[in-house]
Image (cartoon, helix red, strand yellow):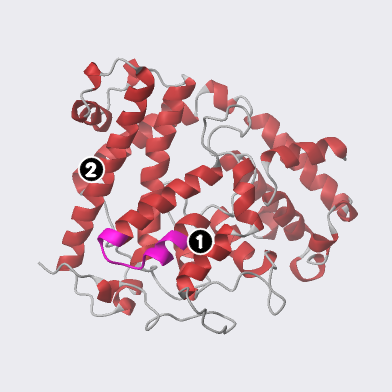
Amino acid sequence: MQDNYNWFAVTKKNTKGRSFPEKPHPYRSDFERDRDRVIHSHAFRRLEGKTQVFTPGLDDYYRTRLTHSIEVSQIGRTIAKALQLNESLAEAICLAHDIGHSPFGHTGEHTLNNLMKPYGGFEHNWQALRIVDLLEHPYPDFMGLNLMYETRLGLAKHHSPYDNPKDNKFPEVNCSLEGQIADVADRIAYNCHDLEDGLRAGLIRPEQLKIEIVQQAQERINASELKDWTIRRTRTAKSILDFLVSDCLNASKNELEKADIKNINDVYSVKRNYIIISENSNAMLCELEKFLLHNFYLHPTLIQATEKIQNWITSLFDKLCENPELMPGYFRRFIESEGLERTVCDYIAGMTDGYCQKLLEEI
């Protein structure tokens, strides 16, 4: 069995580079620079105030969109390192995969999409591209962050059961293996950590956990011997995470061993993913996802705020369209080129939950 998959990886020899050429950095690779540009961006920092499942500020123990992104990057880098792929590229995509999210999670995204349907809609993966290509502006010579082509491609192609972007900007059928890692890492992270947060909040009760992947995890950690519920809850989630990462590594190695890949273009040209979870583990993970949907995401405690959030964002959108002078001058300058409604959407999408509420109260 071949242990070195470096020829599948994105490297400085096969990259398509940046839209605006830049001098090489003396001690950081191009993809390390991408990672750092994402971390230092305004959009990344604002993830701290954006909903993952619970609204930030209600309880400091729950995950935010920022802590989720950091956890995804840790999983992604682990997988990339074990498969000897481009760790920094995988990490950059993982860190940036949610920077296009609107305030108030998927409720906010669906509301903005409905408001923007006459103007092209709204989808957070494509918003992430708008941010890195246009809205961030820390450099004097170009708009955006001027990220490497493969980093942007990974954002454009990112998908999960809750992410299905309509891609029409990139000619590739698929993204790199590093981008595929981000897809799997995201799916592992939010399922394991949403389960843990749901249990912590008491919205999921221990006696409900009759699903196979959870029961197997509890057997592995000898859960019946753990009297401290906090430890038991945390170790269960971590055991599921470790199981899925290990499964991903084994299944992906088998896929890559069988694959007829001669160069990176072979990865780009097929819809099939080579970074996968095995069929049996995927079935168990799907069962967990179904459980979380019906017992957590659709819990009355969480959905009772849905109508209120929809009204907040709709009111703010209408008010700003009627009075664009209420937006900062930085955003108003995009109205001519991007259109009023798209500019208002960009402004609202970048807000934290708290700032969105505060601005609506002020105006």
Which residue is the extreme one toward the left?
A: 1
Q: Residue at x 19, y 30 (%)?
A: 220
In terms of secondary structure, what is the magenta stretch mainly? Answer: helix
Where, by quadrant of the figure, is residue 9 drawn?
Answer: bottom left
Look at 66% across and 30% down and name the residue there. 307
Front-most of 220 and 129? 220
Q: What kind of residue is marked 1?
A: Lys
Residue 203 located within the stretch drawn in magenta: no
**Residue 32 shows up from this direction:** yes
Q: Which residues are magenta?
A: 81-92
Q: Is residue 171 above or below residue 235?
A: below
Q: Quadrant of the N terminus?
A: bottom left
Q: Classify residue 125 as left or right of residue 177.
A: right
The label number, if any, that marks residue 4 in the structure image: none
Counting from the top left corner in percent of width and height, residue 115 is at: 70, 48
> In the image, is 104 to the left or to the right of 7?
right
Precedes in sequence: disc 1 or disc 2 = 1
- Amino acid carrying label 2: it is Ser
Residue 206 x %, y %: 35, 18
Q: Percent x, y for residue 8? A: 28, 73
137 or 153: nearer the viewer:
137
Name the residue tied to disc 1. 166
Residue marked by disc 2? 281
